[in-house]
Image (spheres, helix red, strand yellow):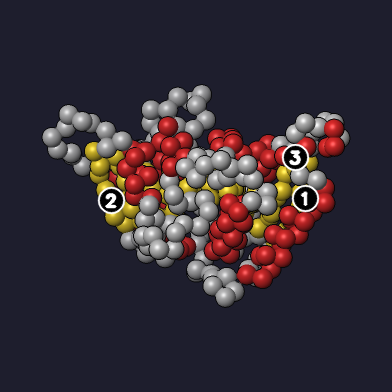
Amino acid sequence: MVIVGIDGSEDGRHALHWAAGEAARRDQPLRILHAVAFPDRPLESSPVADTMVGLDEAGRIVDDAVADLGRTWPQIDLTANWIVGTPWAVLTRAATESDLIVVGSHGRRGIGAGLMGSVAADVAQRATCPVVVVRAARDPHGPDQHGVVVGIDGSEASMAATGFAFAAASARRLPLTVVHAVWDPTANGYETPDVVDKIGSLRQRWPEVGVHARYENGRPARVLTDLSAEADLLVVGARGCTAATAVLLGSVSRNALQQAPCPVAVVRGFAHEDLPVPTPAVQPVGG
């Protein structure tokens, strides 16, 4: 099951449609969730009442989302509801019964195009399943998007991310760029690392995916963010080789979520054999 969190924002609507496309590609049901964080006191007496969503509006947000998808993705098995609770906590709990969580990068109080909202950050840090954070649609006159990009460093999380990226590229019929970046300002040259050799079994499982391996001498987060400008999807592991186990997200994944202009998938460790087998690409009605 794919679960998408919505809040009535523009980024939430883009996340909704991205999630619908992903559910169609996976041939999985889609569940729409809207979390309403009510204060302890009545809304009219609360100093933060203007930031809270009333019951009527919660129902409208959910109904509008269902109607929106019904016009463009009528083939999807769809359920939708709103729940009282802190948004990140509701979505993180839902992740235990989901294959994928999708959220917008900003909520209704988003303050900057280059930053990530608190709900997206909290869900990406805590959810047990892969999380995709979607930004608003990019400039149609900007560079064309033409592939999936994944960062790899040999860690368990990055190998899981690479498996996810292969499945995503196959489902979209797009090429995959596998990137290994190391920052070493003293290096005169750069030797091909053994780490990319580890993807041999993934190549065998998805032989239809065209793979391009890149070896970069540069800060990994910057390299991946630069490449994401022309990507449909950037995939990163939740933690890399150097991240402490107490840190929920490594520095590379945090920076990618904050700065990448394309949707970013954060993947925690799991066996790539458990990934869904992709189905042929599906288009929305009128798309």
Residue 65 appears in the rendering: yes
Q: Earlier in the sequence, mark 2 or mark 3?
A: 3
At horizontal 62% and vertical 70% (from top left) the residue drawn is: 72
- Between 32 and 152, the one lying in front of the other is 32
Image position, residue 121 (x, y; %): 56, 37
Q: The residue under label 1 is which amino acid type?
A: Ala
State the mark number for residue 50: 3
Q: Mark 2 touching mark 1, by CB under 8 A?
A: no
Establish if 38 lies above or below 177.
above
Q: Nearer the viewer, mark 3 or mark 1?
A: 3
Image position, residue 114 (x, y; %): 47, 42
Image position, residue 216 (x, y; %): 25, 42
State the mark number for residue 213: 2
Residue 127 appears in the rendering: no
| Circle 1: element type | helix
Q: Earlier in the sequence, mark 3 or mark 1?
A: 3
Q: Is residue 65 left or right of residue 152?
A: right
Residue lying farthest to the bottom in this orientation:
286
From the image, which quarter does the C terminus lie in? Answer: bottom right
Q: Earlier in the sequence, mark 2 or mark 1?
A: 1
Q: Is residue 115 left or right of residue 79?
A: left
Q: The residue under label 3 is which amino acid type?
A: Asp
Q: The residue under label 2 is which amino acid type?
A: Ala
State the mark number for residue 171: none
Establish if 3 lies above or below 282.
above
